[in-house]
Amino acid sequence: MLFFKANKAAFSRLACGAALLVLCACGNGDEAEVPVQVDGAAAATVNGEKIYVSDVELEAVARGLVPAGQPLDHKSTEYKTVLDQLVDQKLMAQEAIRRGIDQESAAQRRLQMARERILGNLLVEDLVARQVTEERIDKMYAEQVTLQQSNDEVSIAHILFDTEEEAQAVYDEIKVGASFESMARTHSKDTATRMENGDLGYVSPNEQPDPFPVMIADTPEGEISKPFKGADGWHILKVKDRRTRAPKTREEMRPEIVTFLTLNEISKILRELRTQATVQEGGPGVDSAPAAPISLDNGLMPEEDAAPEPKQGSDL
């Protein structure tokens, strides 16, 4: 988990606006890595149309069969399975074109949407390649380690009450000598922890609902808090122990950092594009002009699973 300086609500708004693009562009959703690059090696030729080895590798990454960047053994069962499915898909597409299905209006709309989705994914990949650098990852990792060091694990217990009056009465008893543990067993409404003296174990304060993080921070070790209102009633909190949790390694935290940096870049470019764009929602006449036909075989519509013929000397 990343301990961002920005609040969780702000990050949620950022993530919701761009997460769909990231999920589409990233193979398994865990890590925003640049997909396998296109090369000229053909895995198969179907009626004169090539399926590239890189197509098979990219599809395997997208399905979560192999991590991004890890070579796929061309003799493996996974490779053969994916290749067979791409051959079938190619055959079906060719037959659809032969029957003229690709020229139907409904097909044109869906092809246009698919093209836009693919172009959006390619933009995400370009942003990752250009902006999500190892230097930025290193910088953010150092910041996260510093923030995580202030998020020690704390052993806590609590007593849950229905009303403030009940909580205050028990608090007063504990302050004059009553045992917190005995009060928890006899008064707590939390049936899951009552017979365990209210024990909640070790928790990370920043992962708890408000106002627990503040109350934990304000309560010294071995002491109890004043009664406070939570989402499920009134609480008295006891801080039993504090311990430092070792931060995650760079490699453990890297997928989260890459995803966050990617979301941030997408959010920035979307804000800029929306500021410059003219967007008209609904209303008569919006869809009056027919779209220009899109052909599967004229180069305007790149297939999701078959790469175009690479140019001589291209890195793609």
Image: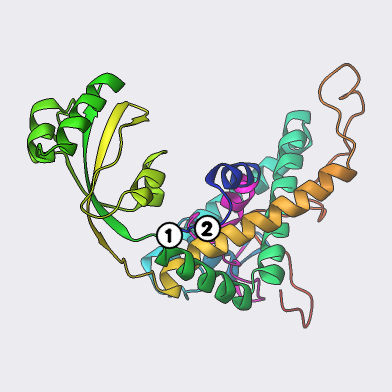
Q: Which mark is residue 184?
A: none
Instruction: Find the magenta span and give its range.
Output: 18-45
Q: Is residue 281 visible?
A: yes
The disc labelled 1 sits on which kind of residue? Thr
Residue 27 numbered tag: 2
262 vs 220, left or right, is right
Magenta region includes residue 215: no
Q: Secondary structure at mark 2?
A: loop
**Mark 2 or mark 1: whose residue is earlier in sequence:** 2
Quadrant for the C terminus, please.
bottom right
What is the x, y in percent for residue 177?
11, 39
Q: Say which of 71 and 25 sits in front.
A: 25
- In percent of width and height, residue 229 lies at 36, 29
The type of residue carrying mark 2 is Gly
Classify 42 as above or below 111.
below
Quarter of the N terminus within the rendering? bottom left
Q: Are marks 2 and 1 in contact (CB under 8 Å)?
A: no
Residue 120 vs residue 69: left or right? Answer: right
- Give the Cα separation between the discs numbered 2 and 1: 18 Å
Q: Secondary structure at mark 1?
A: helix
Q: Which residue is mark 1?
A: 81
Magenta highlight on residue 41 = yes
